[in-house]
C-alpha cells in the first residue's frame, strides 16, 4: 500500500489514513516486558501470522506485562486490532494502549474523559478491531493487557492502522523568541486563522504575542498549565468601550505531550479549538478589526514590548506546524527566512526532558533504599494529585528511634515525626494549602538533631521549622505512596489513605532515585505503580457542570456544586423553577412574584416575574426601570433624546416568554406640549421606539406594524382630523397619545427616541408600562394518539453527554411507548410498561440500562401525569409525578456519549404497541416539540387534548366548578361566596353601625314558583321540586368579626312567621335561633363557651336537614342538635335575608327586636345560604345583583375572613416563594408603580389613617345626633308604634318590597 505523507495533522482528503503499520516491521521493532521462550518473542505478535508459537506470550501473566512496537518515526494512528495466540487458549480480553514519541514518558489513550480500556478477544483467532475516536500521533505504541482468558494466559497478535506523519519541529529553550515581521509594518485583519501544536513540561509560558500601538493585542499563553487567550480588538480612551477579552481552556498541558491549537476569528466571533474541544465566544467591545504593528512573536514577548509584560515567562518546549494566516512559520524558520532573537538558541529537534514520572493508584507503593544510619534525614520530590488526602512518604529511623510520615492532609502537606527515645512523643508540622489542584508541587523535608524544616514549592520564606528535641538516624527503606500489605498496621501508619497521583524527581538522602532501575527490578520494589507515565485526568475540563455549577474532583470522579445557580441535578442541568406562570397556576399557586425558567435546562437563566392569576387568564409581567411620566430632556448637540429601558431580565429571556405566549401587550404613552410625535400623515417620524432585535418601529400604541398612526388615527377621533396623532397637531396645550403595543414579535420596548423637543416651549413626557404576556402555548402543546399504530416523527435528538426529557401524559391504556430514538447500537426510550410502571431505558455503548418507577396508584386513570427523565455522564434518573426519584449511577469507566441517528418517534416504536392517549408539553433539553403542528398533518393523531378537569379540578375549591377549556381549565365561582382563580378569595365587607343589606329571594314581578326554583333550591337536591315553596333543609356558612354586642349577624325572614337568625348576645356568646312554627318559643342553640365579640375572625357553618342541625364553629368539632318533636320541619315561604340589621314589617321576635339597636358593626365575609351569596351579589355585578338592597355604603374588606386552617408553607421549604420586595429584583411593581420613597410612603400612610379616623369619628357623632330625624324609623326597642310609618317609608322607598302573604298557620298567642 502506498505511503501517504501527512503534513501537520492534515492528510489529503482523498487519501484514507488506514495503512497496516505493523505487518512489515522487523523483529527488532518489537519489545516486551518479558517472553516465555524464544518461540514466544514479541516479533511474532503480528496479526494473522503463525510464526514461532503463533504470537507473543510473557513469562508471567500479570498486570506488569507489555508489548511495544517502534514504527521508526512518527505515525498518525487511527485504529488498532488484536488476536489471541494462534490456535491456543491464550488471548487478551481487555487492554490499554499507551503511546510516546521517545519510548519514554508514556501517555495512555483517552476516550470519553477516561483512560480507555479496549475490549479484547473472545477466542484465539478472530480479529477485533477498534477505530480510535480521535487519531493519535506517535512513534511508539505499547499494549498493556488488563485481563485475559482465565483458562489460559496472555497471548497476543496485533495490527496498528494509520499513515505517515511529518512536521517541522522547533525547540524553544525558554529564552529565544521567533518573530514574524509584517511586510507593511502594520497588519489590519478582519479574519485570522492561527494554528500550531506544542508540548512542554512547563506550566507557564507565552506561546505567541502580537500588539498594536492603538491598544489592540492578541496573546496565547500557558498559566498554571491551562491555555489562556487574551484578545483586544480596541478600547476607546473614555473607557466606555472595553475590549479586553480573556478565555481559558484546557488543563494539565505541561505533560510534555503534543497538544493542537486552532484559533479562527471572524470579526468579534472566535472559535478556539484545543485538542478537538471547540469553544465559541464573542469578544467584548464594538470593533471587528485586529490592528497589529510590526510583528507577531512566537515563544515569548517581543523585547520591544511594554515593561509590564516582561514579567511573563517565555515558552520552553517544542512547537510544530505553526501556521499564521496561511504562512508556514516553522518552514520559514527552518529555511532561515525568519531571524530569531539574539538571546537563547533555536533548534529543529525536540529536546526531551530527563524526568521519569511514576503513577500511583489507590493500592500502590514504591519502596526505595536510602543511605542508612546517617544523622541527616533528607527527602524531596514533586507530586500532583486531585485527592485532598493521601500518604506521600513513610520511613522508619534506625535503632528504633521512631519514624517519619509525610502526608497530604486536606490539601496541606503534613509531617509527623514519632520520637521514641525516652517517652512516646510526636512532632507535627504542616505547610501549604490547596495542593490537590492537579499542579506539580515540590516537597522538601530535612531533619537532623533537634531541627526539622519543611519547604513547599521552593518558598524558603514560608518554610516551616521546628526545634523540638529530636535524634535522627536514617533507616534502610523509604516507602512512597503506600505500604506493602504486610506492613499496613496502625503502629506504622497514622494515615490510612493511600496516594493517588504522580511523583517525579524523587530524592532520598540527597540522591536522585533511578526509577528505571526500579522498573527493571535492580533497585527497591513496587506494587501497582506505573513508571514513566503520569495518567492524571482533569475531569473538570471540559466542565460537565452546566449553568455555572462549580466542578470539584478527586482522582476517580467529579462533583458539581449547584448552589445559587437555580439548577439542580448531578450536573446542574435541571432548572429548579417552573417554566412559566401557567405551570405555577397548575400547582395551585396564587398571584405573586415567582422565578421562572422559560427554556428549562437550556442556556437561558431563570428570571423573576410577577404572575397575576386572574379568573380565566394567567398574566406574566416583566418590569423595567423607566418611571411613569418621565420628562424628556433635549440635547442641543444630538437633537434626539434616547430613553433606555433596563428590564429585570435579558432580551433573550423576554423573547422566550413572548414567543411561547398567546398574547402580549405593553402600554405606551406620549404626553406632549408643542412636541410632534409621528409627523403624520406623511413625513419622517420625530419619535420612534426600538423593540426586539434592535429594530426601529414607527407606529404607536393602539396601532399596528406598518401603520404610521396613533390610536386616535385608527379610531378617527384625533384632536385635529388632519393628523393621525393628537400630538402631531403641535398645540401649545398638553395632549396625549396612548395605547397598547400588542404585536408580540416586536416586544419589548427597549428604547424610545424622541426628536421634537429642541424648540422653545416644547415639552414631552413618556410612560411605558411593563411587558405583560398571557397564556403559554408550550405548556398546552398537546397531541392525542387515537390509533396504536400512529406516531409523530421529529429530527434526531441531540443529547450526547446531557439529555433531559419531560412531558405530561394521560391515558386509559395499560401500556404504550411514549418516545424512542435509535442509533447503531445506542438508543433512548421512554414507555408505559404497565398500568403502574414507567420505564426509561437507554444504551450509550456499555449495554442497555433500564430505570423503572412503580406507582402505588394506577397511571392509566385518564388524569395528567408528569414524567421527568435525565441522563448525563454522572447518572440517569426518572421521576413520575411526585414519586421518589429513581437514580442509576453511570459506570466510572466506559462510554459516555449517546450517539443517535434515526428520527425521534413520539407515540410509538418499531415492533411495539404504540401509545393511546394524550402527550402534552414534551420538552427535550429545554426545547418544546411542536406536537400540535405535526399532529395536524399526521393521520391517527389529533392536535390538542381535552379533559383537563379530571387532573386539575381539585384546585377549584369551596364548591367552585371546573370548566374545560382548549388550553387548560378555569374555575367557575358563580355559585359560591368566593372569587379568584381557584374560588379561595373571600368576598366580604365592612359594616358601619346602622348599615344593613337585604337580599330578596325573588326580584320584582317574579312568581313564587320561579323564586324558589331559581334561588333557594339546591341543585344537589333532586327531591325538591319547583312547586314546593318550602325548605326542609338549608346550608348556611359565613365568617365575621366584631367587638360590639349584642347584634344581629344574619336573619332570614319569611312570608309567614318562620324565621332563622344568628345573633351575638350581650355576653358576646353566639346564638342560633330557629322558629319554624309548632312551638311556643323559638328553638335556640347557645354557644356559651366562648366570647365571639373579641375582634377575631370566626367561622360559622350551619346545616339543617329536617330536624337535624349540625353546627361547626371555627375549627372545633361539629356539634349536632335536633329540633323539638313538636316543631315543624319546613321553613315556609322564605322571603329575604338580612345582614347587619333586620328591617322587616310585621311582628319580630322580642330579643331580635332588642339586639337590632344600634346594629352590627364589624366585618362579614363569604356569606352563603344554599346557593345564594348575598355579599358577593352586592359587591360583584352578577345576575343576582338586582335582588340586593343596601342601606349605607358597603366597603369591600376581607377583615372578617377566617384564618387558614393549614399554615402556609415557610419560605425555606417552598422553593417558589419569593418576597416581592427582595433586594435582588430592582424593578418590581412597587418600585415602578409610583417611584415614591418608601419612608415617605409610610409617613403619608400614617397621616392618611389619622385624618380618616378623625373624619369617621365626626360622621359617627353627626349620625348619632340626628338619627331620629330621618324620613322613617327602624325597628328599635323604643318605638313599636312607629313600625307602621317605618314600613310605609321602606315600602315607598324600595319597590322590591312586597306585601306579606297571610298564612293560616297555627300561632301561639301569649
Image (cartoon, grey):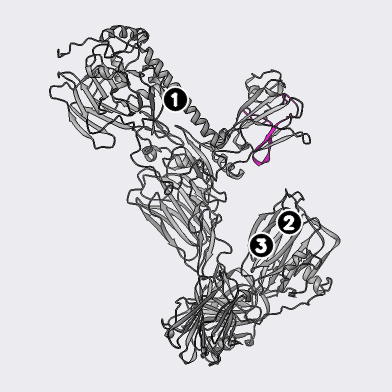
Pointer 2: residues within 10 angstroms few (<14), some, or many (20+)?
many
The N terminus, quarter of image: bottom right
Q: Quadrant of residue 47?
A: bottom right
Q: Position of residue 711 (x, y in %)?
A: 63, 24
Going 46% across and 88% down the picture, which residue do you hit? Answer: 421
Which tag, 2 or 1, sits closer to the chain's start? 2
Going 28% across and 9% down the picture, which residue do you hit? Answer: 1283
Which tag, 3 or 1, sits closer to the chain's start? 3
The residue closer to the viewer here, 227 or 166, is: 227
CA gap, disc 2 and disc 3: 19 Å
Q: Position of residue 348 (x, y in %)?
A: 76, 77
| Residue bounds of the magenta highlight | 678-706
Q: Which residue is mark 3?
A: 273
- Name the side, left or right, on which 714 lies relative to 544: right
Which residue extends farthest right?
184
Query: Looking at the image, can residue 756 be seen?
Result: yes
Amino acid at each position: 500500500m502506498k505511503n501517504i505523507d501527512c503534513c501537520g495533522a492534515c492528510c489529503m482528503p482523498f487519501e484514507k489514513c488506514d495503512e497496516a503499520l505493523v505487518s512489515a516491521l522487523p523483529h527488532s521493532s518489537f519489545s516486551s516486558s518479558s517472553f516465555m521462550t524464544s518461540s514466544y518473542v514479541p516479533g511474532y505478535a503480528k496479526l494473522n501470522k503463525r510464526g514461532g508459537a503463533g504470537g507473543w506470550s510473557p513469562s508471567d501473566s500479570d498486570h506488569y506485562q507489555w508489548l511495544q512496537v517502534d514504527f521508526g518515526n512518527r505515525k498518525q494512528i487511527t485504529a488498532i486490532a488484536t488476536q489471541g495466540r494462534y490456535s491456543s487458549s491464550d488471548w487478551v480480553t481487555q487492554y490499554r494502549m499507551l503511546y510516546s514519541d521517545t519510548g519514554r514518558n508514556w501517555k495512555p489513550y483517552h476516550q470519553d474523559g477516561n483512560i480507555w480500556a479496549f475490549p479484547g478477544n473472545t477466542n484465539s483467532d478472530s480479529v477485533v478491531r477498534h477505530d480510535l475516536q480521535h487519531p493519535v500521533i506517535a512513534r511508539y505504541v505499547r499494549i498493556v493487557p488488563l485481563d485475559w482468558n482465565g483458562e489460559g494466559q496472555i497471548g497476543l497478535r496485533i495490527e496498528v492502522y494509520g499513515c505517515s506523519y511529518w512536521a517541522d519541529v522547533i525547540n524553544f529553550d525558554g529564552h529565544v523568541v521567533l518573530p514574524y515581521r509584517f511586510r507593511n509594518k502594520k497588519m489590519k485583519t478582519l479574519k485570522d486563522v492561527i494554528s500550531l501544536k506544542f508540548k512542554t513540561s512547563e506550566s507557564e509560558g507565552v506561546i505567541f504575542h502580537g500588539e498594536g500601538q492603538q491598544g489592540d493585542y492578541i496573546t496565547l499563553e500557558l498559566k498554571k498549565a491551562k491555555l489562556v487567550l487574551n484578545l483586544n480588538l480596541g478600547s476607546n480612551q473614555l473607557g466606555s468601550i472595553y475590549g479586553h477579552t480573556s478565555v481559558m481552556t484546557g488543563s494539565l498541558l505541561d505533560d510534555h505531550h503534543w497538544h493542537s491549537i486552532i484559533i479562527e476569528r471572524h470579526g468579534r466571533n472566535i472559535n478556539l479549538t484545543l485538542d478537538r474541544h471547540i469553544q465559541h465566544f464573542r469578544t467584548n467591545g464594538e470593533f471587528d478589526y485586529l490592528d497589529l504593528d510590526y510583528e507577531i512573536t512566537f515563544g515569548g514577548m517581543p523585547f520591544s514590548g511594554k515593561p509590564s509584560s516582561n514579567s511573563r515567562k517565555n515558552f520552553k518546549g517544542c512547537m510544530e506546524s505553526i501556521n499564521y494566516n496561511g504562512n508556514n512559520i516553522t518552514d520559514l524558520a527552518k529555511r532561515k527566512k525568519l531571524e530569531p532573537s539574539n538571546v537563547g538558541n533555536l533548534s529543529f529537534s525536540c529536546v526531551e526532558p530527563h524526568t521519569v514520572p511514576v503513577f500511583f493508584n489507590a493500592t500502590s507503593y514504591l519502596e526505595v533504599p536510602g543511605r542508612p544510619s546517617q544523622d541527616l534525614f533528607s527527602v524531596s520530590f514533586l507530586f500532583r494529585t486531585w485527592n485532598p488526602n493521601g500518604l506521600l512518604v513513610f520511613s522508619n529511623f534506625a535503632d528504633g528511634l521512631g519514624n517519619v510520615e509525610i502526608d497530604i492532609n486536606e490539601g496541606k502537606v503534613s509531617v509527623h515525626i514519632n520520637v521514641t527515645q525516652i517517652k512516646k512523643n510526636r512532632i507535627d508540622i504542616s505547610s501549604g494549602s490547596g495542593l490537590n489542584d492537579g499542579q506539580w508541587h515540590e516537597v522538601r523535608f530535612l531533619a537532623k538533631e533537634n531541627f526539622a524544616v519543611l519547604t513547599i514549592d521552593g518558598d524558603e520564606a514560608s518554610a516551616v521549622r521546628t526545634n523540638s528535641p529530636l535524634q535522627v538516624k536514617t533507616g534502610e527503606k523509604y516507602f512512597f505512596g503506600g505500604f506493602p500489605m504486610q506492613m499496613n498496621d496502625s503502629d506504622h501508619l497514622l494515615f490510612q489513605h493511600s496516594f493517588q497521583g504522580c511523583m517525579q524527581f524523587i530524592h532520598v538522602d540527597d540522591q536522585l532515585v533511578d526509577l528505571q532501575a526500579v522498573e527493571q527490578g535492580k533497585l527497591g520494589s513496587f506494587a501497582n505503580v506505573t513508571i514513566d507515565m503520569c495518567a492524571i485526568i482533569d475531569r473538570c475540563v471540559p466542565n460537565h457542570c452546566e449553568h455555572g455549577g462549580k466542578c470539584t474532583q478527586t482522582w476517580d470522579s467529579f462533583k458539581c456544586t449547584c448552589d445559587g445557580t437555580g439548577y439542580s441535578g448531578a450536573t446542574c442541568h435541571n432548572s429548579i423553577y417552573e417554566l412559566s406562570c401557567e405551570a405555577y397556576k397548575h400547582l395551585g399557586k396564587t398571584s405573586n412574584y415567582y422565578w421562572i425558567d422559560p427554556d428549562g435546562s437550556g442556556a437561558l437563566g431563570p428570571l423573576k416575574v410577577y404572575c397575576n392569576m386572574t379568573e380565566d387568564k394567567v398574566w406574566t409581567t416583566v418590569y423595567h426601570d423607566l418611571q411613569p411620566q418621565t420628562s424628556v430632556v433635549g440635547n442641543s448637540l444630538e437633537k434626539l433624546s434616547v430613553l433606555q429601558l433596563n428590564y429585570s431580565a435579558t432580551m433573550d429571556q423576554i423573547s422566550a416568554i413572548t414567543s411561547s405566549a398567546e398574547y402580549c401587550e405593553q402600554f405606551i404613552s406620549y404626553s406632549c406640549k408643542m412636541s410632534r410625535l409621528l409627523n403624520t400623515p406623511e413625513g419622517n417620524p420625530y419619535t420612534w421606539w426600538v423593540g426586539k432585535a434592535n429594530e426601529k418601529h414607527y407606529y404607536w400604541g393602539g396601532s399596528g406594524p406598518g401603520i404610521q398612526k396613533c390610536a386616535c388615527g385608527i379610531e378617527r377621533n384625533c384632536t385635529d382630523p388632519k393628523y393621525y396623532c393628537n400630538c402631531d397637531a403641535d398645540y401649545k396645550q398638553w395632549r396625549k397619545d396612548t395605547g397598547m403595543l400588542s404585536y408580540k414579535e416586536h416586544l419589548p420596548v427597549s428604547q424610545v427616541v424622541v426628536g421634537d423637543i429642541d424648540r422653545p416651549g416644547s415639552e414631552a413626557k413618556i410612560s411605558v408600562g411593563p411587558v405583560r404576556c398571557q397564556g403559554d402555548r408550550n405548556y398546552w402543546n398537546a397531541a392525542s394518539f387515537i390509533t396504536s399504530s400512529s406516531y409523530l416523527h421529529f429530527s434526531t435528538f441531540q443529547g450526547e453527554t446531557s439529555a433531559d426529557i419531560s412531558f405530561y401524559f394521560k391515558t386509559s391504556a395499560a401500556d404504550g411507548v411514549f418516545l424512542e430514538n435509535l442509533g447503531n447500537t445506542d438508543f433512548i426510550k421512554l414507555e408505559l410498561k404497565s398500568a403502574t410502571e414507567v420505564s426509561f431505558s437507554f444504551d450509550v455503548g456499555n449495554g442497555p440500562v433500564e430505570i423503572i418507577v412503580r406507582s402505588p396508584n394506577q397511571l392509566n386513570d385518564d388524569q395528567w401525569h408528569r414524567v421527568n427523565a435525565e441522563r448525563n455522564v454522572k447518572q440517569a434518573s426518572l421521576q413520575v409525578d411526585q414519586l421518589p426519584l429513581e437514580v442509576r449511577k453511570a459506570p466510572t469507566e466506559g462510554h459516555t456519549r449517546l450517539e443517535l441517528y434515526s428520527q425521534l418517534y413520539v407515540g410509538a416504536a418499531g415492533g411495539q404497541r404504540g401509545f393511546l392517549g394524550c402527550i402534552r408539553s414534551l420538552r427535550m433539553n429545554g426545547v418544546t416539540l411542536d406536537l400540535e403542528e405535526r399532529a395536524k398533518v399526521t393521520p391517527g393523531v389529533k392536535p390538542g387534548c381535552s379533559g383537563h378537569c379530571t387532573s386539575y379540578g381539585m384546585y377549584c375549591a369551596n364548591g367552585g366548578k371546573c370548566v374545560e377549556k382548549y388550553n387548560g381549565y378555569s374555575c367557575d365561582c358563580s355559585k359560591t361566596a368566593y372569587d379568584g382563580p381557584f374560588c379561595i378569595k373571600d368576598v366580604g365587607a365592612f359594616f358601619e353601625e346602622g348599615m344593613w343589606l337585604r337580599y330578596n329571594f325573588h326580584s320584582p314581578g317574579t312568581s313564587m314558583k320561579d323564586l324558589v326554583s331559581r334561588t333557594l333550591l339546591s341543585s344537589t337536591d333532586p327531591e325538591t321540586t319547583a312547586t314546593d315553596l318550602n325548605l326542609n333543609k338549608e346550608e348556611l356558612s359565613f365568617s365575621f368579626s366584631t367587638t360590639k354586642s349584642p347584634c344581629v349577624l344574619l336573619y332570614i325572614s319569611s312570608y309567614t312567621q318562620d324565621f332563622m337568625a344568628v345573633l351575638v348576645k350581650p355576653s358576646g356568646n353566639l346564638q342560633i335561633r330557629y322558629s319554624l312554627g309548632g312551638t311556643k318559643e323559638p328553638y335556640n342553640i347557645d354557644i356559651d363557651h366562648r366570647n365571639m365579640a373579641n375582634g377575631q375572625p370566626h367561622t360559622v357553618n350551619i346545616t339543617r336537614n329536617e330536624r337535624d342541625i349540625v353546627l361547626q364553629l371555627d375549627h372545633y368539632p361539629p356539634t349536632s342538635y335536633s329540633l323539638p318533636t313538636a316543631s315543624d320541619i319546613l321553613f315556609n315561604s322564605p322571603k329575604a335575608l338580612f345582614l347587619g340589621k333586620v328591617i322587616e314589617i310585621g311582628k319580630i321576635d322580642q330579643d331580635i327586636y332588642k339586639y337590632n339597636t344600634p346594629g352590627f358593626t364589624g366585618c362579614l365575609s363569604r356569606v352563603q345560604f344554599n346557593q345564594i351569596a348575598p355579599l358577593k351579589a352586592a359587591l360583584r355585578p352578577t345576575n343576582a345583583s338586582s335582588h340586593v338592597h343596601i342601606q349605607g355604603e358597603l366597603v369591600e374588606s376581607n377583615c372578617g375572613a377566617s384564618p387558614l386552617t393549614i399554615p402556609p408553607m415557610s419560605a425555606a421549604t417552598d422553593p417558589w416563594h419569593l418576597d416581592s420586595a427582595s433586594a435582588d429584583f430592582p424593578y418590581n411593581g412597587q418600585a415602578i408603580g409610583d417611584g415614591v420613597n418608601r419612608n415617605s410612603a409610610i409617613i403619608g400612610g400614617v397621616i392618611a389613617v389619622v385624618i380618616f379616623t378623625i373624619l369617621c369619628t365626626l360622621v359617627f357623632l353627626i349620625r348619632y345626633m340626628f338619627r331620629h330625624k330621618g324620613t322613617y324609623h327602624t325597628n328599635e326597642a323604643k318605638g313599636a308604634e312607629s313600625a307602621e310609618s317605618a314600613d310605609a317609608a321602606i315600602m315607598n322607598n324600595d319597590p322590591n318590597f312586597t306585601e306579606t302573604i297571610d298564612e293560616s298557620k297555627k300561632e301561639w298567642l301569649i
